[in-house]
Amino acid sequence: MSLLEVDDDVVVRFGGVTAVDHASFTAGTGLVTGLIGPNGAGKTTCFNVISGLLRPAKGTVRFHGRDVTSTPVHRRAKRGMGRTFQRLEAFGSLSVRDNVRAAVDINRGLGGLLTPGHRSQAARVDALLDRVGLTHYAAERADAIPTGTARLLELARCLAADPALLLLDEPSSGLNESETEAFGVLLRELAADGRGVLMVEHDMDLVMSVCDTIHALDFGRVIASGAPAEIRGDAAVQRAYLGKADVGQVA
Ligand SMILES: Nc1ncnc2c1ncn2[C@@H]1O[C@H](COP(=O)(O)OP(=O)(O)OP(=O)(O)O)[C@@H](O)[C@H]1O
Ligand SMILES: [Mg+2]
């Protein structure tokens, strides 16, 4: 049993568009799993099904072995699913620190009683800022920091809930090369902590260097699953990227 199982051929349709077309894949504890594919392949739609924003027309989502296909978003979150969004969601007028503090407070309300005696709120906020490398941005307003940095803030806010599964939608976009490298190290650490990471990502260098397993989507279908070297050499994956914006990134 994997931590997350998208199973029984999940289907999502929007009118005439089949955004997810009989897709099944998994993500495991202690692993970084990549979900790749050209624009419009259905990656974010899969995340919406996994996190509970969308109910599939067909198929099952299992988390910790339990069927959560009909479980509301907040209950999935409480059971340990954390998600960041492709569009940023932080409170722009608050400082970076206050954004993280708000997330810590919300999670104390939800689950704090389950872990009595844990560190003070301020220490927890500092630890989260440090974890994602944002300590020296702590006093900045969230709407004044660069986009890539704001994505790290999203991640810190998500980690405040101590999720077992992290769903990250294009987390590295806006990061420069050295920031991306550091982010890759952070992803490995988060997995080594015993979390599962499922990441939608267009930066193929990052995906290929950090992921244990990759699932490739095209037109809503899983066209390949495997280790980075297998995906890199997969003819169907290469065809899927040919002629599209990402051409040349997989080869
Ligand atoms: N709410 C919606 N209503 C109608 N069509 C939608 C909706 N959401 C997504 N789609 C369509 O479903 C398909 C998959 O979209 P999705 O956003 O999941 O792709 P993606 O792989 O995340 O793409 P990107 O890499 O550009 O973020 C696309 O054809 C998209 O236009
Ligand atoms: Mg998307």
Image: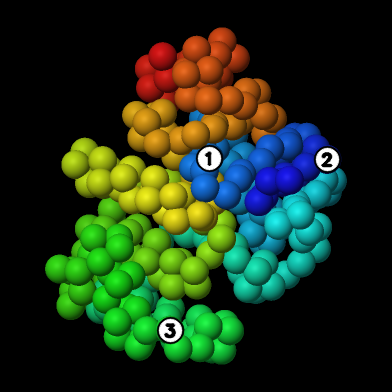
Callout 1 secondary element: strand
As measured in the structure, the alpha-carbon distance from the residue carrying label 3 to the one carrying label 1 is 30 Å
Q: Answer above or below: position of 54 versus 187.
A: below
| Residue at 33% across, 43% down | 184
Quarter of the image holding residue 121? Answer: bottom left
Q: Are marks 2 and 3 in contact (CB under 8 Å)?
A: no
- The x and y percentages for residue 192 are 44, 50
Residue at the disc numbered 3: 118
**On the picture, is 217 further left or further right than 138?**
right
Amino acid beneath label 3: His
Q: Where is mark 1, residue-wise?
A: 33
Which numbered disc flags the more N-terminal residue, 2 or 3? 2
User: Picture coordinates of residue 164 (x, y %)?
Assistant: 56, 60
Seen from the viewer's position, the closer of residues 84 and 45 is 84
Viewer-closest of 85 and 107: 107
| Mark toward the viewer: 2 or 3 | 3
From this view, report whether residue 49 is shown above or below residue 32.
below
Q: Position of residue 159 (x, y in %)?
A: 44, 66
- Image x and y of residue 63, in percent: 71, 56
Q: Which residue is mark 2?
A: 8
Q: Is mark 2 within 8 Å of ligand 1?
A: no
